[in-house]
Every structure is written in C-alpha cells, then in structure tokens.
Amino acid sequence: MAGRAHQPLYLNTADHTVISYRLDGQSVEHAINPDLATIAFEDAEPARSVPSWKGKNVYEGDYWAATTRGFVHHESFLEREYVMSADFDASILGLSWQPFVLKWPKGTKGHRGHVPDYFCRLAGGDGLVVDVKRPDKVEGSEVQFAMTREVCEEVGWKYEVFTGLPEPRLSALTFLSGFRQDRYSPGAEHVAPLVAAFEPETSLDAGVRRAARTTGRSKPVVHGNVLHLLWHGVLAVHLDAPLDLSSTVSVVSAAVSP
C-alpha cells in the first residue's frame, strides 16, 4: 500500500479536540466543526503505519474493493471482514483506512488520542466513521467510543462500532466476494438475458440452467456471471440463510454490471 504515514503525534496543547489528517499531499490540523463534513476523507492518506516486530503474526493486507476499484488496507482479519461487508454495501461509495487522528483536549485523562479504523462516504453524501473491535475487546473501550461518537455528531457523521458479521451471512459474503472481480462480469450484452432468467424469482440452480439454455453459454460461465451480479446488487439473495443452489434469487435492477 503506497504512501503510508509515520506514526502520528497525539500531543494536543488545545483545550478542545482537533483532527489531524493528510490529503492531497498536505498535512492539516483542524478544530472539530461541521465544515469537516465537506472534506473527502475517503481519499485521505493513512494517518499511521502498521508496526512490525520479530515474530509478529501478520494478518494485514490489501483488499481489492470493487466499489472503489482500488486497494483498501486492513490490519486484521476482522478489519478485512468489515472492508468486505462495506464493499458489498450499495450505500457505501468510498472507503479509506485510518484516515485521521482525533487528538483529545489537553489533560484528557487516560486518552491521548484515537485513530478510527475506517471512513466511508455514503451514497447520500454523508460520512460514516467506523471502529473495528473484537467482541471480547469492546469492554474497556466504551469511553473512547463515546468520545468518538460525540465528535461525529458534532461534524454530522454517522458512527458505528463493527464487531463482526453473524453466520451464515459471513460465509455467504465471503463466498460471493470471490466473484466481485471483472473477470466474472458477463459483459453488458449478456446482462439482460441473465436477469430475465430470474424473472419471476427462482432458485439459483434453476436460474443458471435457464440462462445457460437461452444464451447457449456454458453453465459454469453463466454460474460465475450470476454470482458476480449477486455481488454487485443486480440480483439479490437472502444472505441470512445458508447460500446454496436451492437459494431463491430475485431481480433488483437490470443495470449493467460494473
């Protein structure tokens, strides 16, 4: 991941919270106010680098997001889980990893500052700030979460603490995410017949067979195309039940797949 920053400085000599970030090559420190809502934090550079040490278990990496058509960093498997779910969420248009530092007011006992894990730009233009935390680590972080939420409310952002996806949704999304890349796209000329195969709604198996017959294309290719359309929201399936060939698939939109 290019352009990772050095470790941030949390020192704040002011009696109010400030936000520190780097955007378009410029380092900025700003008081918390509603003007921040107009800043493109989805494009900000990471506020910190990931530390490394001998013997460290490495769970970090870069996830290729179909939404942004670029890589988004993650520092843990749980962060990767969040990025995957955000990539699938049609309401999220932009996403960045640890894009700013919140420096708490001078003298704030026990809280030197905080780097939220993700910033998302929502379809309506709003911002969403996300902290990713394992369920067994939430206790003890309530004050930091509350302080971060207060900042978000002052700016006009939404705030969320992500602790993981439930099963079977996690397994279904993990499987579908493997078909998000362009190589599984049916191409604009094939979208309409694939969509028509699921009108009215029908099982995944029956729809794939129908599409293969009507298009004359191989069943494995059509199957991959359909899973691609499910990821991109052209088709829909209930993800809170196990995903298999009997799952019911319906049409959301006849829009061309990315």
Image (cartoon, rainbow, N blue to C red):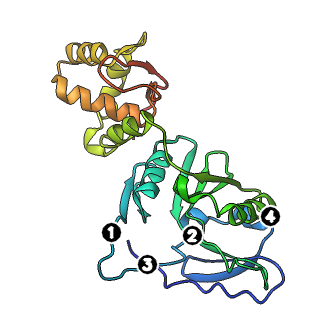
Question: Is residue 9 something that shows in the picture?
Answer: yes
Q: Dot 2 corresponds to which residue? A: 99
Q: Residue at x 59, y 82 (%)?
A: 26
Of pointers 1 and 3, the one earlier in the residue sequence: 3
- Find residue 182 and report its horizontal and vertical position in percent: 30, 44
Q: Picture quarter containing residue 53?
A: bottom left
Q: Residue at x 68, y 54 (%)?
A: 159
Front in this rendered view, residue 106 or 181: 106
Above or below — where is 35 with respect to 238?
Answer: below
Q: Of the residues tagged 1 and 3, which is closer to the observer?
A: 1
Of pointers 1 and 4, the one earlier in the residue sequence: 4
Q: Dot 1 corresponds to which residue? A: 58
Q: How far apart are the two marked residues, 1 and 2, measured between alpha carbons? A: 21 Å
Q: Of the residues tagged 2 and 3, which is closer to the observer?
A: 2
In what element is the residue under mark 4?
helix
Q: Dot 4 corresponds to which residue? A: 34
Q: Picture quarter containing residue 127?
A: bottom right
CB-based contact (under 8 Å), mark 4 and mark 3: no
Of pointers 4 and 2, the one earlier in the residue sequence: 4
Q: Of the residues tagged 1 and 4, which is closer to the observer?
A: 1
Q: Dot 3 corresponds to which residue? A: 3
